[in-house]
Image: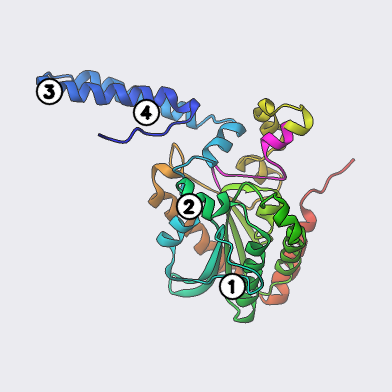
Amino acid sequence: MQKKKFSLEFEKPILELEERIAELRQTSTAHKVDVAKEITALEEKLSATRAKIFNHLTPWQRVQLARHPQRPYSLDYFKLLFDDFQELHGDRLYMDDESTIGGIAFFEGEPLVLIGQQKGRDLKENLRRNFGCPNPEGYRKALRLMRLADTFQLPLVTFVDTPGAYPGTAGEERHVAEAIAANLREMSGLGVPVISIVIGEGGSGGALGIAVADRILILENAYYSVISPEGCAAILWKDKAHAPAAAEALKLDAASLQKLGVVDEIIAEPLGGAQENIEQTAGNIRAALHRHLKELKKLSPEKLRDSRYAKYREIGEFVE
């Protein structure tokens, strides 16, 4: 039996049409009835419905897509985009945090350092990877890799996908805020090209801890925000049910972020989200990565630091 496709609430009209088409095909095969005209009409309606829904998504619907359980994660992209990835483990201080992955790889024949945040596909893996919420050790592992990149003058590419840093007491006891702050400071001063790509959730300081970069790219249906919509709703309205309104107010979707100057480029996804065609999504990431690395490699370490500083100074400017 074919596994039932997961669908979000706003995708239900699409799923219903797909099921009707599948039923018609099954009936045609079983009873040798010609229903080609009916199937064609439904397929045209399906195509129009899919376009209507996905071309007019609200910020909250994009947040839901960013959290889609079949959405590609960092390791999925590592396999498609890079060669000879050699994962490095541990922060050399306490433990190996598996919510943060990284190591050395080759991109189009050139070596670089990779860092990514990784969620799990099932409960067992999610527990092992802490649901993609890094502990302090995850940021200290990332810092070790950042310093490795700087020492050997290798470009650094990070893949952001976290609801936020782990909020438990253990993280506070081991100084998660200090670990993130140290990464912000160190990334600001790296003398190598740094590119960060938000591929799913970009939650608060948990995301920023690996995202101080020369170029910040974001997938079309990812989000990047100072707080989750649910957290914002709980603070402002005392009710998480207001999360859709909070998502709208936070301007956390890719288009709003680009307009505000927070991100540099939006990377297109297939209609329906990255999970619909991971190869196509990876190809779009590859093209953007190739272009930005080519530009950044021309700059000296001093120029990289200066332009990075200027970039962040310009974010959030306002006039009265």
User: For residue 125, which numbered disc appears in the image?
Assistant: 2
Q: In the rendered structure, which amino acid carries the disc numbered 2? A: Glu
Q: Nearer the viewer, residue 284 or 203?
A: 203
Residue beneath label 3, please?
A: 30
Identify the magenta region.
218-233
Rounded to the nearest whole Å, what is the CA distance between mark 4 and mark 1?
42 Å
Label 2, secondary structure: give it. Answer: helix
Label 4, secondary structure: give it. Answer: helix
Nearer to us: label 3 or label 2: 2
Instruction: Please tell me which of labels 1 and 3 falls first in the chain.
Output: 3
Rounded to the nearest whole Å, what is the CA distance between mark 4 and mark 2?
35 Å
Q: Position of residue 130 (x, y in %)?
A: 57, 52
Number of other residues with Cα within 10 Å of mark 2, as a class: few under 14, some 14 to 19, many 20 or more = some
Q: In the rendered structure, which amino acid carries the disc numbered 3? A: Ala
Q: Nearer the viewer, residue 248 or 30?
A: 30
Residue beneath label 4, please?
A: 47
Which quadrant of the rendered structure holds the N terminus?
top left
Number of other residues with Cα within 10 Å of mark 3, as a class: few under 14, some 14 to 19, many 20 or more = few
Label 3, secondary structure: give it. Answer: helix
Q: In the rendered structure, which amino acid carries the disc numbered 4? A: Ser
Rounded to the nearest whole Å, what is the CA distance between mark 2 and mark 1?
37 Å
Query: From the viewer's perspective, is residue 288 above or below residue 189?
Result: above
Residue beneath label 1, please?
A: 297
Nearer to us: label 1 or label 3: 3
Query: From the viewer's perspective, is residue 3 above or below residue 239?
Result: below
Q: In the rendered structure, which amino acid carries the disc numbered 1? A: Lys
